[in-house]
Amino acid sequence: MSAPGMIEIEHAGVRLGTRAALDGVDLRCAKGEFVCVLGANGAGKTTLLKAIAGLVPHSGRLTLDGRDASAMRSSVRGRLVAYLPQGHHAHWPITAHEAVAIGRVPHGARPGAPGNADLAAISRALEAADAAALADRRITELSGGERARVMLARALAVEAPILLADEPIAALDPAHQLTVMKLLSNTAAQGATVLAALHDLTLAARFATRVVVLKAGRIAGDGPPAKVLTAELLASAFGITALHLEHDGTPLLVPWLTQEELRR
């Protein structure tokens, strides 16, 4: 029997038109892990998260909590998996509080009339995402960074055992980038399974318990950041070299030069 929040993927593939966006992916993520999914543009990071969320069709086997995801009702999956897409677009002039309340719909909350348990979850999510002060503002009037925090709060409001976040720190200032990474780390430490697609190798190496590196739709590396993010893998998957440093006992990785610069 799988533990709550367990994700198990066997030989998964996703085709987008004629291109194999994912090809033969095997992955197992457990409760309490904070997994950062890394890779160059087009490597398959977003596609992997969308496949787990049920937003794109896939081949192979995908189970959530030991249950076949393809046979799972959308209402069940909606309570099990919270998904934060990249982009944070806003099309309706609703308040931030109303936007976060959408995260409670999988639990039966009625639009415009959330119950007491829903209101408590919404409040917790807004506080956690440092967005409580934005609750009464319309999301169409927020900056990109403010809107990103509100959308993160919406995902947190689901209070699902699995949290998928696609570029959750894009558009955020450095202080809020750190806040969000610590929040995702703490969410995992409290028992959730957290997968975040990132481009920031420095923050991934610092906060993730594990990194999964994708290259052309396949897994090129999987494990603790210090063991996976080697000079060879960074050159192969990203075309860069990096500085490997340490501060107060914490390893730091800083992208430094592209392979093209080295060849000059």
Image (cartoon, grey):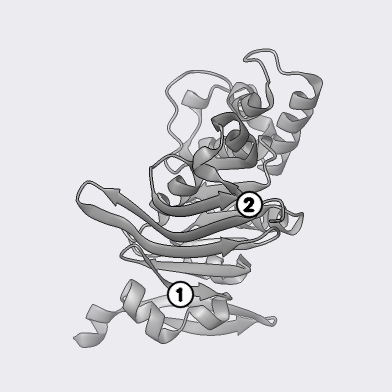
Identify the residue under disc 1.
Answer: 221
Q: In this view, does 213 lie to the left or right of 106?
A: left
- Where residue 24 appears, as percent x and y from the top left, is 38, 64
- Where residue 258 appears, as percent x and y from the top left, is 30, 77
Q: In which quarter of the image is residue 87?
A: top left
Identify the residue under disc 2.
Answer: 66
- Where residue 238 appears, as percent x and y from the top left, is 34, 72
Secondary structure beneath disc 2? loop
Q: Which quarter shows the N terminus?
A: bottom right
Which of label 1 and label 2 is nearer to you?
2
The answer to whether one can see residue 154 in this image is no
Residue 80 marker: none
Residues under labels 1 and 2: Cα distance? 24 Å
The amino acid type of the residue labelled 1 equals Gly
Q: Is residue 153 left or right of residue 10?
A: right
Q: Above or below — where is 249 with respect to 24?
A: below
Q: Residue at x 42, y 32 (%)?
A: 89
Q: Which residue is drawn at 77% across and 54% down?
A: 190
- Where residue 94 appears, as percent x and y from the top left, is 54, 18
The amino acid type of the residue labelled 2 equals Gly
